[in-house]
Image: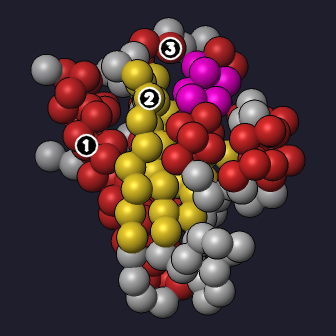
Amino acid sequence: MTPSQKLIESGLYLATAESLTAGLVSAELANTPGASKFLLGGIVCYQDEIKIHQLGVDPELISQHGPVDPNVAIQMATGARVNFARDCSKASNLVIGISTTGVAGPDPVGDKPVGLVFIGISSQLGERAIQLHLSGSRPEIRAATVSAALSTLEDEIQLLLG
């Protein structure tokens, strides 16, 4: 069963915040018939100002560590979860937030190497970030990030459902 099917059957909802993947996670999930039953929406947030103003990421955190950081990923996922739950009148304990941030290349970003990726996840169980070190071309890194995000989502659903 896919993460989308599990979300539909469980009555859980999803909100996304994507930088590196620019909406690819949401698009992949929306390929499922009935996606409107679980996909609340998403924010593509390439610019730091969008992360700060739309998702509530701490500007000091971005200033000190840059946007490719585990805590930025966590704050992005939490911001998506909280904001979409509120805006869609859903109980926040039924919403999962997931985020992606990283360096797809072709060049490093400051001291962050190509292939460094963080996936943030936020649910009633708490928040965490998963760090990945991927290789390949820009499209390959982005595709691998989508795959890893869907796997992370599937794991979170399993934990929530016991």
Of residues 51 and 133, the one nearer the viewer is: 133
Instruction: Look at the image and say whether residue 83 sits in the magenta stretch.
Output: yes
Of residues 10 and 134, the one nearer the viewer is: 134
Give me the residue at 81% from left, 49% from top: 63
In what element is the residue under mark 2?
A: strand
The circle drawn on residue 30 is none
Q: Which residue is mark 3?
A: 92
The circle drawn on residue 154 is 1
Instruction: Look at the image and say whether residue 146 sits in the magenta stretch.
Output: no
Give me the residue at 55% from left, 77% from top: 113
The span picked out in magenta is 77-85
Whole-number angstrom distance, CA of label 1 to CA of label 3: 18 Å
Q: Which residue is mark 2?
A: 127
**Which residue type does callout 3 highlight?**
Ser
- Vertically, is 70 above or below 11? below
Count up the numbered dots.
Answer: 3
In what element is the residue under mark 3?
A: helix
The mark that comes first in sequence, 1 or 3, is 3
Q: Around disc 1, counting alpha carbons within 10 Å, would you say few (fewer than 14), some (14 to 19), or many (20 or more)?
A: some
Q: Is residue 23 shown to the viewer in this render?
A: no
**Which residue type does callout 2 highlight?**
Glu
Whole-number angstrom distance, CA of label 1 to CA of label 2: 15 Å
In what element is the residue under mark 1?
A: helix
Give me the residue at 72% from left, 56% from top: 66
Q: Is residue 106 left or right of residue 70?
A: right
